[in-house]
Amino acid sequence: MKSKLPSQLPHDWSSQSSIISKIPSLTGNRTRLAVLSYLHVSLDGQGSWKVYHRTIERFATALSSASKRYLDAVLIPGDLTRDGKKKQFEAVFAELEKVSVPFACVPGNHDFSGENC
């Protein structure tokens, strides 16, 4: 039994042929993606079990690794920053400017909790 979906959706999502997004492959027959999520970049966090003080370096390392692979894009779904501070976003964007692979970022709840709300 198919569930009835709200009528305001732009497509018939119950159809098997419906797609949410399409990313053309730049590298061949299959689309190759890297997904980096829950970055929580913090420039001033200290000594928690989440090691916030290392987040920008870890992000830079992950991006560098992704850039060396034969990828079509890097997707970053949410929580780019620890708490939405301008300097945290600037650090994330500075790292993203260093890569040549296409990327897409989607803000998460942490990205709307700081001074940019």
Image (cartoon, rainbow, N blue to C red):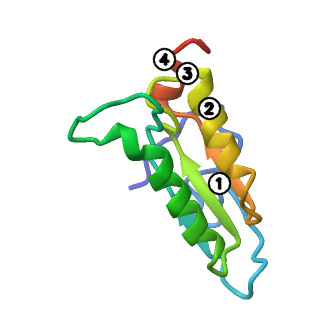
Q: Nearer the viewer, residue 2 or 102?
A: 102
How many C-alpha atoms fall within 10 Å of the one at disc 2: few (<14), some, or many (≥20)? some
Residue beneath disc 2 = 89
Do residues under tags 4 and 3 come within 8 Å of each other at their CB atoms?
Answer: no
Do residues under tags 2 and 4 come within 8 Å of each other at their CB atoms?
Answer: no
Q: In the image, residue 36 lies at what x, y percent? A: 50, 56
Task: Classify residue 10 as left or right of residue 84.
Answer: right
Q: In the image, residue 57 lies at what x, y percent? A: 48, 51
Give the Cα separation between the discs numbered 3 and 2: 7 Å
In the picture, the disc for residue 74 is: none
Residue beneath disc 3 = 85
Q: In the image, residue 19 lies at what x, y percent? A: 65, 59
Give the Cα separation between the discs numbered 4 and 3: 8 Å
Q: Is residue 38 visible?
A: no
Do residues under tags 3 and 1 come within 8 Å of each other at their CB atoms?
Answer: no
Residue beneath disc 1 = 20
Residue beneath disc 4 = 113
Give the Cα separation between the discs numbered 1 and 4: 28 Å
Residue at 60 percent across and 26 percent down: it is 87
